[in-house]
Every structure is written in C-alpha cells, then in structure tokens.
Image (spheres, grey):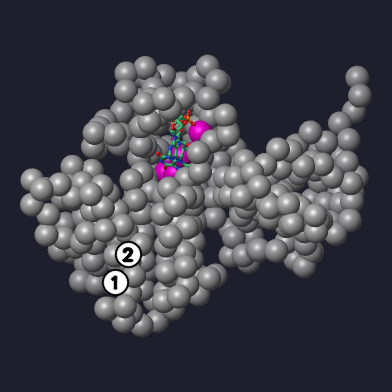
Amino acid sequence: MTETQVHKVRFEPVGIEMEVEEGETVLDAAFRQGISLMHGCKEGQCGSCKSKLIDGDIELLKYSTFALPDYESETNHVLLCRTHAYSDVRFELLNYDEDLLSRSIAVKALSGRVAKISALTADIRLLEIEIEKPLKFWAGQYVDLTLENGAVTRAFSMANPPSDGTNLRFIIKTYPNGAFSSQLDGKLGVGDAVIAKGPYGTCFRREARPGPMLLIGGGSGMSPLWSILADHIESNEQRPVRFFYGARTRADLFYLDELAAITAKFKDFKFVPALSHAEADDGWDGEAGFVHEVVLRHLREEKLTGVIDAYACGPTPMIDAVLPILQMNGVEPDHIYFDKFTPAVR
Ligand SMILES: Cc1cc2nc3c(=O)[nH]c(=O)nc-3n(C[C@H](O)[C@H](O)[C@H](O)COP(=O)(O)OP(=O)(O)OC[C@H]3O[C@@H](n4cnc5c(N)ncnc54)[C@H](O)[C@@H]3O)c2cc1C
Ligand code: FES
C-alpha cells in the first residue's frame, strides 16, 4: 500500500502554515485543520478563494473561467478550492480577513434526521433537521447537506441562530428538476437520514459593531439573514437595522407577521420588501422593482451615519447587482459580506 504524500503549505503575508495531503484540495485541508480562508462555493464557481501561487508544484481541478479568467491563471493565480499540491507550496492570500481567521471552526460531519418539512410559499420550504450533537457555527454560515443515499450533496445556510445547534433549520427554494430541492416535495420524509458537514461560509454576523446593519436578500437568501437577525436580537446589541428583501409577487413573501412583531418591538428596525413583478390583484403599495434598485433609493434618501456592515445573500445576479451599489454609496468593501447561492456543479 502506498502512503499518502503530505506537503507543507505556507500562506503569505499572514505566515500561517499547515499540511495538505495529496488528493485533497488546499481549501479542504485548511477546513480540516480549522483554518478559515476566504471562500464561497468551494466548487470553483465564485472566485472567493482566489490566491497567488508563489512557488511549488500544483494542479488545478476543473473550474469556471468566471471565477478564474485565463489572464489570471496565466499570471499564477489559483483557486484554493480547486488546487491539489504535489510539493511543499507557498501562496499569497489576496483576500483575507483577520476576523475570519480568528473565528475559525473546524469542519465536522454530523449525522441527523429530517424532523419536519413545511411550505413557506409556493416554492420555498422550511427543512428542519435534528442532529446528533450541536453544530458550532456563526450566524449566517452554511453546511453541506448529503441525503441518505449519498447521491446528492448541496450547500444550505442555516436559518436558525447558533444558540439552537441541534435543531438546524433551512429555507430552501425548490426547483422542479433540482436533484436535492425537488425531494422536499414528497420524496424526503420525517426520520430520513441526512449528514450535515460544516460550518462553512464567510458571511457571518460580525459582533459588537455599533454602526447600521444592512440585510439584503432575495428568495431563499432569507435563510442566512434570518439567522443573522435572530442572533443579533439575542445579543441585545443596539444598532440600526435595515432589512431589504426581494421577491416577485406578494405571494412570494413570508414571515411577515414575525417581521411586523420585530418592527413593533425594535425602534430602529425597518423591513423593506420589494416586489419585482407585483400583480394587479396584489394591491401592492410597497416598494416596486429589483431589490438592488430599492437599496439604492433608500441609501440615497436615508443618510445613515456610522460604519455600515452589509450582509447580502441570494442568487448570483442579485449579489452582483447589489455589490457596486453598496460600494458607491459609502459601504467599505471590507464591511460587505455576501454569499452567492451558485448552482452546484453536476
Ligand atoms: C454558499 C451557498 C449557500 C446556499 N444556501 C442556500 C440556502 O440557504 N437555500 C437554498 O435554497 N439554496 C442555497 N444554496 C443553493 C443550493 O446549494 C442548491 O444549489 C440549490 O438548492 C439547487 O440544488 P438542486 O439540487 O435542487 O438543483 P440542481 O440539481 O443542482 O439543479 C437543477 C436545476 O435547477 C435549477 N437551478 C439550480 N440552482 C439554481 C440557481 N441557483 N439559480 C437558478 N436555477 C437553478 C437549474 O435549472 C438547474 O439546472 C446555496 C448555495 C451556496 C453555494
Ligand atoms: S471558487 Fe473557490 S470557493 Fe468559490
């Protein structure tokens, strides 16, 4: 039997060192050793883990050229989630966050069972899973859920706050042909086995910040934002919160009673739903348009003071539209946290 080759990895300029086994990606090796590097999809789709190879022998697995265009791969840029090392290797981290590094949680796989599946709208479900041991995570993070037969694994963000570590809840949009999500409508049942592996993700609540907090989401992007909001409320921290949520029609909105109760209780909290395709019989007199347009209008009208933290979660086009608006309206890039719900590589 041949022994697994292990190589040393060093990250500059932070000086962190770790090991990587041949056959695992550098990003997975970091997760295993409790080192939280910048990442998003873990599948070569989003570009969040982009770094520069300084020296060493590596190979890149298949990735999207949206995440790493040719002109970057030609200048020694790599995606750590797609990198296998074949010698000791050094990388320069292009993006790193001291807060993220200091709050790393080692990734674990935990067994669980489906406790409940309920409908929030015509195509959004709430999946509840009881797991064997509490999962330690930060509000806003996600896990990879694998169904019993192991045939399908997908990333889903917890909707519950970390204080509730054994009953994990997920807000999931169903796609008719979705290998995972379509199973929520009948195929997956109470008691079915699930494995939750995590936590992953960099879009988690930064604590003890006094400035305004913007929550921006669309569709199932509600999931991590709901966790962040619940965790913020539990913390008793006082800060202005503006929650922008995009949906197509009135029927696609949910949790309105809960949000009305939060609005009544907290004086500097505003929930701003935006409908992109309000129907005539919706009788909608709220914000119309895409959520990024509504965020822009609000940031121009309401001059928020203090250092703003913004959390944006949902479909990639929504995030791509919202990021420049935030940056051009006074939100510092290193105070913008986001998760793009990129489709899985099949
Ligand atoms: C970091 C991260 C966090 C995520 N968190 C959540 C979450 O909390 N809730 C949630 O619902 N999803 C979340 N996702 C997306 C989720 O992982 C799956 O990609 C999604 O549920 C579709 O999986 P599926 O197996 O049902 O569909 P697949 O079998 O992967 O795809 C089947 C078909 O469905 C359609 N489809 C799938 N994904 C998309 C998409 N994103 N946009 C448009 N069409 C699509 C396409 O037509 C596709 O061909 C997250 C993704 C990432 C990367
Ligand atoms: S491309 Fe590596 S985490 Fe998304």
> In which quarter of the view is residue 231 placed?
bottom left
Task: Say what secondary structure mark 2 lies in.
Answer: helix
Viewer-side residue, 83 vs 196: 83
Q: Nearer the viewer, residue 133 or 333?
A: 333
Res. 132 visible in picture:
no
Residue 80 at what x, y percent from top left? 72, 49
Look at the picture and state if 143 lies above or below 285.
above
Can residue 133 be seen in the rendering of this structure? yes
Q: Which residues are magenta?
A: 154-158
What residue did someone put label 2 on?
A: 293
Rendered location of residue 301, percent (x, y): 27, 78
Q: Residue at x 35, y 62 (%)?
A: 292
Is mark 2 in CB contact (under 8 Å) with mark 1?
yes
- Residue 192 placement (x, y as % from top left): 41, 19
Provide residue 67's location: percent of width, then percent of height: 63, 50
Total marks placed = 2
* Residue denoted by label 1: 297
267 horizontally vs 220: left or right: left
Amino acid type, residue under disc 2 in the picture: Glu
Q: Is residue 289 magenta?
A: no
The quadrant where ligand 1 appears is top left
Q: Quadrant of the N terminus?
A: top right
Give the amino acid type for the residue marked by disc 1 in the picture: Arg
